[in-house]
């Protein structure tokens, strides 16, 4: 029994050493540069969104409707740019600046579905559409129901 | 006349504000990716932003940002969380308990349907480059 515990400790120590080694060898991200490009790309996407939002507002939509139509438009643009392979390039430059906007959500829906198309229309396209969108919808639905229930109890 | 909306936005600085606020929200995501473990994927970022956005919205902290920055606050996925939370809250006011379950999905149904329909069409029509 005692030997077992020692062995285990030794193993854990070795794993710790290995982890430190990995941390050392792993290339350090250039955080400032990454943040600058995330700001630039993410900001530009939101600027394009603001163009659409302002346009839809002048077309007589209320703010919430205009915002929803804008989001839909940006999803279509993001999906299309993913289809023609341009969004990958934007992502290489923009990092999180291309993930966080709703166009990144569209990208996360199209990219895996396109990639695994050969697995068929049900398990390929159908299932892979939700590789990332699935978790987003699961946690989104969970949190909105929790908020709704708490509000119901307090209301 | 077509460009009237363009001029309107430039005059009110709304484009600049959307750019700066949207950019800063993305920087938060980038810092999260760079300063934490390498195992953080886009899926974690998106789930995190939706959840945090919904919670902020429930406490009434996200609406002021939307009023200030417009698309700079609604285009990042935290805006999706904001729609979910506000949908749930408004539906509870109208329908009670049923609204707690229906509201979030109802408010975001258009966005989800557009994403699924266009995502499907694009994925079927196009092939990956490499």
Image (spheres, rainbow, N blue to C red):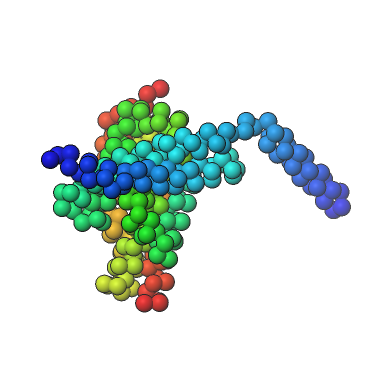
- Count how many numbered circles sit on residues in the image: 0
Q: Nearer the viewer, residue B3 or A140?
A: B3
Q: Nearer the viewer, residue A82 or A32?
A: A32
Name of the residue lying farthest toward the right: A2
| Quadrant of the image containing the N terminus of chain B | top left
Q: Nearer the viewer, residue B90 or A107?
A: B90
On screen, residue B130 above or below A133: above
Residue A150 in view, yes or no: yes
Q: Give residue B119's position: percent from left, percent from top.
A: 30, 39
Q: Quadrant of the rendered structure where residue B91 is?
A: bottom left
Q: Give residue B85's position: percent from left, percent from top.
A: 37, 62
Q: Give residue B12's position: percent from left, percent from top.
A: 28, 48
Name of the residue lying farthest toward the top: B130
| Quadrant of the image containing the C terminus of chain B | top left
Residue drawn where x is 46% and y is 34% of the image = A37
Q: Quadrant of the rendered structure where residue B56 is?
A: bottom left
Q: Nearer the viewer, residue B60 or B122?
A: B60
Residue A119 in view, yes or no: no
On screen, residue A73 above or below B55: above
Q: Give residue B34's position: percent from left, percent from top.
A: 56, 40
Residue drawn where x is 31% and y is 71% of the image = B92
Residue drawn where x is 37% and y is 74% of the image = A152
Q: Quadrant of the rendered structure where residue B93 is?
A: bottom left
Name of the residue lying farthest toward the left: B1
B2 relative to A53 in the view: left or right: left
Residue drawn where x is 57% and y is 33% of the image = A30
């Amino acid at each position: 029994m005692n030997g077992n515990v020692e062995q285990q400790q030794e193993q854990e120590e070795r794993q710790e050493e290995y982890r430190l080694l990995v941390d050392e060898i792993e290339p350090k991200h250039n955080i400032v540069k990454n943040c600058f490009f995330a700001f630039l790309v993410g900001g530009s996407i939101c600027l394009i969104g603001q163009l659409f939002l302002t346009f839809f507002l002048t077309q007589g939509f209320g703010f919430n409707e205009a915002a929803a139509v804008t989001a839909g438009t940006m999803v279509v643009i993001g999906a299309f740019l993913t289809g023609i392979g341009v969004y990958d390039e934007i992502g290489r430059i923009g990092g999180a600046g291309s993930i966080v906007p709703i166009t990144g959500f569209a990208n996360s829906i199209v990219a895996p579905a396109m990639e695994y198309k050969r697995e068929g229309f049900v398990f390929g396209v159908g299932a892979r559409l939700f590789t990332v969108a699935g978790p987003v919808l699961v946690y989104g639905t969970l949190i909105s129901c929790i908020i709704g229930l708490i509000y119901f109890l307090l209301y | 006349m077509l460009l009237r909306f363009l001029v309107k936005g430039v005059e009110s600085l709304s484009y600049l504000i959307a750019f700066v606020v949207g950019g800063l929200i993305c920087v938060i995501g980038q810092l999260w990716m760079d300063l934490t473990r390498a195992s953080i994927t886009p899926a974690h970022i998106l789930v995190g932003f939706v959840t945090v956005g919904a919670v902020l919205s429930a406490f009434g902290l996200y609406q002021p940002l939307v009023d200030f920055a417009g698309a700079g606050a609604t285009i990042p996925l935290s805006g999706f969380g904001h729609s979910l939370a506000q949908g749930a809250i408004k539906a509870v006011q109208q329908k009670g308990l049923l609204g707690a379950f229906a509201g979030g999905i109802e408010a975001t149904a258009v966005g989800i349907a557009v994403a699924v329909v266009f995502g499907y069409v694009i994925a079927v029509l196009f092939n990956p480059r490499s």
